Image: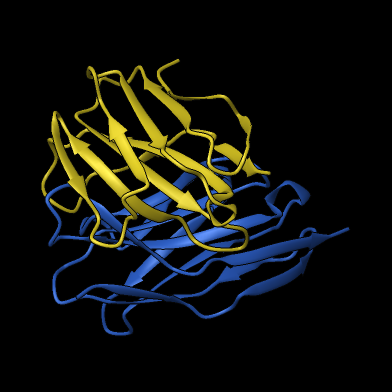
Chain colours: A yellow, B blue
């Protein structure tokens, strides 16, 4: 089945130790997104790629970076995780070829990050 | 600018009774509206989507939502709740001003279902 896959599902890191989260998709979608979701809150968009074009949200901290080496994969790098970065990180994809605003986003299962 | 308000942070129902989760939106465009469901420690699953076609939208698992422009509402309903419906539900509007398709989320409604 075509899907959005995130690895690992659970990640534990130490304060200040860099960590990378992975997302892959078999949907062949043009757009890939990273969201941060803290406990009992709605997901918050960090950034997205439209093909190779990177779009950063204005309030995303510099501590968060992303890479998209090809259509299928996208990575979230947290350079120096702090305790406040503990959250669920959700990857999503969308086709990007629909009319603006009608694109449906498909989410992966998420990676829960714990910072010790 | 687009925004969405979920009117109830928590809804409790008994199994077999109807479900109503309320959502109001604000948009200067004709919006696309979505309902997503999130079970504990899982990703978001699309329940249904409105994109200016039929105002009554049928989704998965027996859910449906009606777009009412005059009331700027997009409430989610289900005739008979099941225990497996217990989850967090997000009403979402698309932000047409973004280069991609940015989603604007409501704060979520927690649905509890008792036996």
User: Looking at this view, is B87 or A30 the one in front?
Assistant: A30
Is residue B81 positioned above or below A10 on the image? below
Q: Position of residue B102 (x, y in %)?
A: 25, 54
Nearest the viewer among B89 and A32 is A32
Residue furthest front in the image: A16
> Number of callouts in the render?
0
Give the side of residue B96 with respect to residue A19, left or right. Answer: left
A116 shown above or below B19? above
> In which quadrant will I find the N terminus of chain A?
top left
Answer with left or right where residue A41 lies relative to residue A32. right
Image quarter of residue B67: bottom left
Q: Residue at x 36, y 44 (%)?
A: A64
Answer with the quarter of the image where residue B19 lies: bottom right
Residue A53 to residue B17: above or below: above
- Image point (49%, 61%), residue name: A42
Q: Residue furthest bottom?
A: B71
Where residue A50 sits in the image (x, y, percent)?
Answer: 16, 36
- The image quarter in which residue A31 lies: top left
Front residue (pair B40, A53):
A53
- Front residue (pair B36, A7): A7
Q: Position of residue B78 (x, y in %)?
A: 59, 59
Q: Is residue B54 left or right of residue B11?
A: left
Is B16 located above or below residue B106 in the figure? above
Residue at 16% x, 68% y: name it: B30
């Amino acid at each position: 089945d075509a899907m959005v896959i995130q690895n690992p599902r659970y990640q534990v890191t130490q304060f200040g130790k860099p960590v990378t989260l992975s997302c892959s998709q078999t949907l062949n979608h043009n757009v890939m997104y990273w969201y941060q979701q803290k406990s009992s809150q709605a997901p918050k968009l960090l950034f997205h790629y439209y093909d190779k074009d990177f779009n950063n949200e204005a309030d995303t901290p510099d501590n968060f970076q992303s890479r998209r080496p090809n259509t299928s994969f996208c990575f979230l790098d947290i350079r120096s995780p702090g305790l406040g970065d503990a959250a669920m990180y959700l990857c999503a994809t969308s086709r990007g070829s629909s009319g603006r605003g009608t694109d449906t986003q498909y989410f992966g299962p998420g990676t829960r990050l714990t910072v010790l | 600018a687009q925004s969405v308000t979920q009117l109830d942070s928590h809804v409790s129902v008994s199994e077999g009774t109807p479900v109503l989760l309320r959502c109001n939106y604000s948009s200067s465009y004709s919006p696309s509206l979505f309902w997503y469901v999130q079970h504990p420690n899982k990703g978001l699953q699309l329940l249904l989507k409105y994109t200016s076609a039929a105002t009554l939208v049928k989704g998965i698992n027996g859910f449906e939502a009606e777009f009412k422009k005059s009331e700027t509402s997009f409430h989610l309903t289900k005739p008979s709740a099941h225990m497996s419906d217990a989850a967090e539900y997000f009403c979402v509007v698309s932000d047409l001003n973004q280069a991609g398709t940015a989603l604007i989320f409501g704060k979520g409604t927690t649905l509890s279902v008792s036996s």
